[in-house]
Image: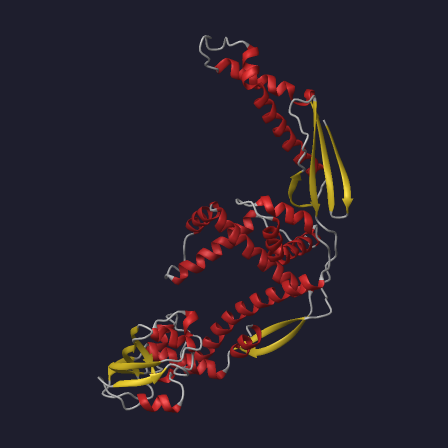
Amino acid sequence: MNITKENVDALNAVVKVDIVAEDYQDKVTKVLNDYRKTANIPGFRKGHVPMGMVKKQYGKSVMIDEVNKLLQESLNKFLVEEKLDILGNPLPRVQEDFNWDADKFSFEFELGLAPEFDVNLQPKNKVTQYNIVATDELIEKEVENIQSRYGKMSAKDEVTEVANVTGTFVNEEKEINKKSTISVKDIKGKTNLKKFVGAKVGDVLELETKNLFEDEHKLQGALGVSHEEVHGLDIPVTFTIEEITEIELAELDQELFDKLFADGSVKTVTDLKDKIKEDAEKQFQQQADQQLLNAITENLVESTKFDLPAEFLQKWLQTAGEKELTADQAAEEYSKSEKGLRYQLIEGKIMKDNDIKLDYAELVDYAKGFIRAQMAQFGNMNPEEKELEDIAGRILQNQDEARRLQEQLISQKLLAFYKENMSFDTKEVSYEDFIKEVYK
């Protein structure tokens, strides 16, 4: 057997595998002898079927099977030994005149080679790193939300500006008939507010959906319409009031503080606000980190230039999936996945060049931390180590779960690396401004 590689260009190559009878004949003979021992053919005792008959019946199919096994094994071994960094899988070249009755066989495979490139971790256009702070307004609003959650609800005779109103929205043309509870604080505009304030149970309010709520999603929930329908919805509705309630805010006292923080760490309103600020900014940090990683990814893909064997990859995509694609479908699929492939190559290059690795023990520890956090949410603050080990082991046996946790841990390692080795434009913002800037 002889294997040779010819480079077409820097990104494409062809591997030729020549196979002769001596390479596979011994294995074919062994398989046929095994068949002879077990074959059940009428007129012959088991194990006494003439070899000629076995060869005639099974010889060609066994030979084809052994040649294909040898071909796959030798090709894979060659790729490993030659340390070829390929994209996709080798593509066999179709040979119109191929003949399985020939004395020797030649097979050719097209390869798409990974490009060589360098990654600049100090690109000209710097990424913005956001530091999201909890504003006094946000903290005060959360204090009020806490007081409301632990407050007492009481029925009211008429609607006030701080009341919750339960009633039914109706529009016959759009087939809307939805019972909902809304907060008067969410109503938009003085005109609409006037219709609510002072109204009583049994009153029917005539409203327009356009600009009814401060938040369009509130309208979606109140009317029970779809996300697509609610945008720009401008129809008349009636709202029949069925119940009016108001929440008496809970006192900011030690009883409430102990309900919120059983460890006794909060003694004053200032302590409570400090806790709210700390917890909020921890959550904000997670969002800021995810945004930073996304921005770095986009930046590196944009600033790291290299060519890909696009024609080969499109050809490979035609047969790579469960369903064969047309050339146009494969080109479209390649267009969608090209950016992701480029970042995979960049990520792999960074990890290799900087010895960023992930071993199984790290993955187990990460899974245990994830499990510990979930158990804490259900009140189990001190799970036993063996219990964590057992649950982590079961989770990591699931390939999809293991892959998801592995991707999360790699992202954490890469983000830590980027923070240490890249320069950023830092910007301190409120959460509201962060949302406006990042999710325009």
Q: Residue at x 48, y 15 (%)?
A: 39
Q: Residue at x 64, y 28 (%)?
A: 70
Quick one: 104 or 249, which is closer to the camera? 104
Residue 1 appears left or right of 215 = right
The N terminus, quarter of image:
top right
Above or below, 209 against 49 in this view is below
The C terminus, quarter of image:
bottom right
Q: Quadrant of residue 109?
A: top right
User: What is the x, y in percent for residue 308?
Assistant: 70, 52
Residue 167 appears left or right of 116 = left
Quick one: 409 or 334, which is closer to the camera? 334
User: What is the x, y in percent for residue 359?
Assistant: 58, 48
Q: Quadrant of residue 158?
A: bottom left
Above or below, 196 against 222 in this view is below
Above or below, 420 against 257 in this view is above
Above or below, 295 against 360 in this view is below
Q: Residue at x 64, y 56 (%)?
A: 338
How is the rendered protein coloured? secondary structure
Q: How many marks?
A: 0
Residue 412 appears left or right of 167 = right
Quick one: 381 or 96, which is closer to the camera? 96
Quick one: 152 or 80, which is closer to the camera? 80
Q: Residue at x 64, y 57 (%)?
A: 343
User: What is the x, y in percent for residue 274?
Assistant: 47, 78
User: What is the x, y in percent for residue 55?
Assistant: 57, 15
